[in-house]
Structures are given as C-alpha cells and as structure tokens.
Image: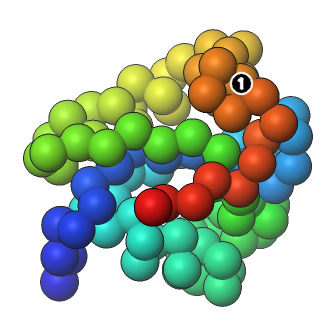
Amino acid sequence: MARFDFIAAYMLANRKNGTLYAGSTADLGARMEAHKTGTGSVFAGKYGCNRLVWFERFDEMAPAIAMEKRLKRWPRKWKIDLIEEANPNWDDLPLF
C-alpha cells in the first residue's frame, strides 16, 4: 500500500540526452529503490533508466498523475529543456 510520503511526477534517464522515462508515484523514495534494482518498470529496466534527472513534488496524487500524462505527450525537446533548466549536468538527483 502506498504511504504517500513523497508524491511526485518524475523523469529518469539512462545517461545525458539518453532514453527518458516519465512516471508518477506516491512514494518517490520507494519507487527509486525499485528502479535502481530494475523492478520499477519493464521499460525503465530494459533501457537502464535509473538516473533521477527531474522531479516535482505534489500534495496529492491527482496532479502528479496529470503532470506525468502531460510529460508523456510533450515533445522530447521540451522534456530535455525542463531537465536542463534545473539539472544541466543530468546528475542523479538526491531526494533529500
């Protein structure tokens, strides 16, 4: 059961300018642990997307899910611009 500790929409990458994965979760810490071990999602595991390059926190799940859906519709350039605005080196971001 989700704990709703760290509600967020997020993007992962396998490397700078590499494959991107967008998601949302009620507990980003637990979700990142799953991604790091290759059990977060089939797509992310297949392409090695386990580097947290962008996230936005939310108070409720509905807006986080809506943001994930928007991100998935965005052109790749917009996603890259969003990442590089806050994380120009595409570092694996800490949660705290």
Residue positioned 54% across, 18% down in the render: 74
Q: Position of residue 64 (x, y in %)?
A: 27, 41
Residue 7, image quadrant: bottom left
Q: Quadrant of the C terminus?
A: bottom left
**Which element is circle 1 on?**
helix
Q: Give me the residue at 71% from left, 56% from top.
A: 92
The reply, left or right, for residue 84 in relation to residue 62 is: right
- Residue 24 locus on image (x, y percent): 37, 51
Is residue 82 in view from this perspective? yes
Decide if residue 75 is in sight here. Answer: no
Asked if residue 34 is positioned above or below residue 84 in the image, the reply reads below
- Residue under circle 1? 84
On the rendered structure, is 64 left or right of 14?
Answer: left
Quadrant of the rendered structure where residue 48 is?
bottom right
- When the figure is inspected, residue 9 is found, relative to residue 92, above or below; the finding is above
48 horizontally vs 72: left or right = right
In depth, the one of 67 and 89 nearer the eye is 89
Instruction: Pick the quarter of the image with the N terminus.
Output: bottom left
The scheme the figure's colours follow is rainbow
| Residue 11 position within the rendered picture, expressed as x and y whole percent measured from the top left | 57, 44
10, above or below 33, in the image:
above
Residue type beneath disc 1: Glu
